[in-house]
Amino acid sequence: MKNDLCQQFNRLYHKDAENAFFSPGRVNLIGEHIDYNGGLVMPCAITFGTYLLVSFNDDNIFRFRSLNFEDQFDIPLQRSYTKTGAGWFNYPLGIIDFFLRDGHQLRGIDMMFYGDIPISSGLSSSASIEVVTAFALNELLNCGYSRLDLVKLSKSVENNFIGVNSGIMDQFAVAFGEKNKALMLNCDTLEYQAVDTNLGDYILAIINTNKPRNLAESKYNERVRECKGALAALQQKLDIQNLCDIDTATFNQYKYLIKDEVLLKRAQHVIEENDRVKLAASALSKNNLAEFGRLMYASHDSLRDLYEVSGIELDTVAEYAKTDPNVAGARMTGAGFGGCAIALVKEDAFDSFSKQVIAYYTDKIGYAPSVYRSLIGDGVGVLESVIGGR
Ligand code: GLA
């Protein structure tokens, strides 16, 4: 892989790349739409991700090229930048803008990106490109940011430069991921534990619905606003900072404060999902995959009925999974509105699962999903070390 990329870099820039970096994408096992509510989440980095090859130039120009997209972008070194159109290069541009505004001296850089994460699939290609750029600049220019700083600054670029009010889960997962581990992350305190994903006879499958996620950003921001509304209602009586500061029992006692039916459903999902993550962590530690799978299905149902971020495509995958005795559990992963689902599938039945879910889905939806076997990999790093572990 690295040699191919080096050749492509040479083809584009007529010189050799000086450095290469890799940042993964992620799947979230459980704990959906609760990171921005101070909840517990359980993401893992995957072995698909974003490669970045770079070389400094003496022209004081930032050059952005991608092997995935036709559009390219060149911009001279300035004091700061704003989002320019809707192009992919806004993610790395936003990171450069952050470094400049934070007082770092930058010089021209020729960049080439390549991603093998299916685009717009909900596997965090955006966090991956943000974090790989931030990691690379930090290394190349000795800026002294910690890994957690890189996570926070990448999230701030997503929120303020790109304009999506996402939580911190994706950037955290792609920066701190560890091979064969899930991160139990408390999104309020940012304390985390890397726990073994010992799936026994099972493996994790990723099912990409291949549904374009058109309305995802505006709907996402709408959900964030709805949660704020529900929190404000509860704060009339409760001294809390986040919806996830209370458990389901307390919520049931105070939910009368939320008068709006829609906000009530949103809050119920968030608080119950947070409780489900605690149960899921305990099930995983006891290798109780049947219970873990049951919680996955419950999470999906709640995202479908209460949070309303699923859709017929993702529901069809979960619906098929429930009929397959070789599947312990399945659910949508990430923001939803299309994108990917994950399923815990018996390893020796993966091929038949794959065939059958493709047939069932194609019959109902009219086009095929893509099915992958997901491997859990390491977080962002210099390419050699990442490649060595792949
Ligand atoms: C997107 C966001 C995350 C998180 C998930 C839903 O991936 O970037 O912060 O909110 O959706 O759990």
Image (spheres, rainbow, N blue to C red):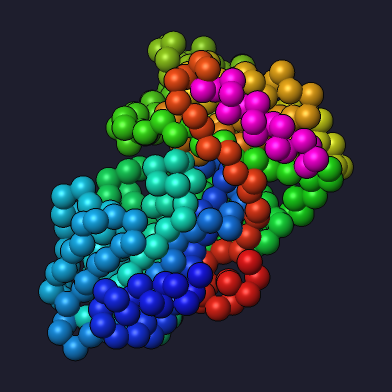
| Residue at horizontal 52 percent and vertical 17 percent from the top | 363
Magenta segment includes 370: no
Q: Nearer the viewer, residue 237 or 48?
A: 48
Relative to residue 151, is residue 126 depicted above or below?
above
The residue shown at (49%, 58%) is 49
Left or right of 174 in this view: 157: left
Specify whether residue 315 is in view.
Answer: no
The residue under the point 33% across, 70% down is 112
Residue 384, percent from left and from top: 55, 78
Which quadrant of the structure image shows residue 217? top left
Viewer-side residue, 384 vs 91 = 384
Q: Residue at x 64, y 31 (%)?
A: 355
Question: In the image, is residue 348 part of the stretch drawn in magenta?
Answer: yes
User: With respect to residue 90, does 246 lie above or below?
Assistant: above
In the image, residue 108 sits, relative to residue 214, either above or below, namely below
Is 41 situated left or right of 289 in this image? left
Q: Please state if 24 lies on the left or on the right of 156 as rendered.
A: right
Closest to the observer, 211 or 311? 211
Q: Is residue 197 left or right of residue 340?
A: right
Residue 225, x across and y down, in percent: 35, 30
- Across and down, in percent, residue 67 comes to 34, 61
Q: What segment is highlighted magenta in the picture?
A: 346-362
Characterize the magenta stretch by its predominant secondary structure: helix
Residue 369 x/y as whole percent:
51, 32
Image quadrant in which the C terminus is located: bottom right
Kindly indicate the quadrant of the structure image that contains residue 46.
bottom right
Tell me, yes or no, if residue 187 can be seen here: yes
